[in-house]
Amino acid sequence: MAGKYLKHLLLFFLSASAIVGAVDESVVDTDKASEYYKEKDYEKLDNIGFGKFGTVSKVREKKTGKIYALKTFGSGPEGYEHAEREINTLEQLDHKNVIKMIANSLGARSKEDPVHIVLEYMPCDLKYAALNHPEIKENTREILHHILEGVAHIHSKKLAHNDLSLKNILIDPANMSVKICDFGNCHEGGKEEYLLGVFIDGYYKDVSSVVDLMVHLYLGKSMLERVCLRRISIGKMERFLKTKRVGGVLPQSGLGMIYREMEGVVTENGLDLFLKALATKNRGGYTAAASAQEHPFFDGIRELGPPTKEPKQRRLLN
């Protein structure tokens, strides 16, 4: 029975706060810029964060005054591999809900040098914004829709992000511009991994991550604290859906408790989207995120964020 529900709905190393200024500050007019950039052309303003593979700094381009985030990866093999994967992924992506890469040093460095990536600078990640900006709650549908748009673009390239979380979603609370970031764990969407006794592909992993984002934004806590989405079998979900459809008593499981809590804060369409997302499984689905955007839950939402000029990518030279 789960087959009649929407199929496959949705379908780095640092926190998204490590790529944190307004979009209008971050867009470069590449028509007026020189072809290459040198690291000395950037002035470091502040440290933003650090992680397993390196650091992130807030920088200003001296020539233009533009504000960016500069990721600096360690020169070791792991850091290089992570940086290379992120750069190669970002070179394939071009979407308003995906962070823009402005420049990088991958092809213009000696073996001993670290890798640098210059990225758009956003004020904060979604985790921080949800705790400190009440307007986030008022725009939850719009934010989820924009996340879906970004994921749909990633999946259209047959890629999966593989690490979607509140910290890897950047947002500008001033205009609600939303950007997915941190692509160091990105891989082919159809690639399967064996996790908790089941095989899942990257598309489905992204699906379950977006469901968890939905729960976290509405309830203020992660769904994964109570239930592992990847262990919910088709049979178990069919029984849950049948019980709900006939008005039966929902099970006292983690899923049942979360659903009851969601009933108090989400519309019927939102609950329908939630259940249909959970009813999907891990067989294909790179078009699922695009399909999910058409769900009635998103009817009538307004566009968030200002229109942006797409910057061209440039290489950062040492």
Image (cartoon, grey):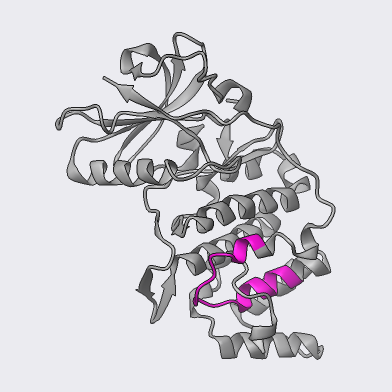
Q: Residue at x 70, y 57 (%)?
A: 218
What residue appears at the point 82 percent right and 88 percent down from the top-left corner?
A: 247
Whether residue 266 can be seen here: no
Name above or below for residue 40 compared with residue 112. Answer: above
Residue farthest to the right, as pictured: 300
Q: Quadrant of residue 304?
A: top right
Image position of 239 (left or right of 40) = right
Q: Quadrant of residue 293?
A: bottom right
Could one spot residue 268 in this view of the protein? yes
The x and y percentages for residue 112 are 14, 30
Query: What residue do we see at 34% from left, 24% from top?
Result: 316
139, 258: nearer the viewer: 139
Residue 309 horizontal/vertical position (percent): 61, 28
Q: What percent of the width, then of the height, locates residue 290?
A: 64, 60
Q: Which residues are magenta?
A: 272-290
Image quarter of the N terminus: bottom right
Give yes or no for residue 286 being in the magenta stretch.
Answer: yes
Q: Indicate left or right for 71 with 64 as reference.
A: left
The foreground one among 21 and 312 is 312
Q: Is residue 119 left or right of residue 166?
A: left
- Find residue 312 and report its horizontal and vertical position in percent: 49, 29
Q: Quadrant of the C terminus?
A: top left
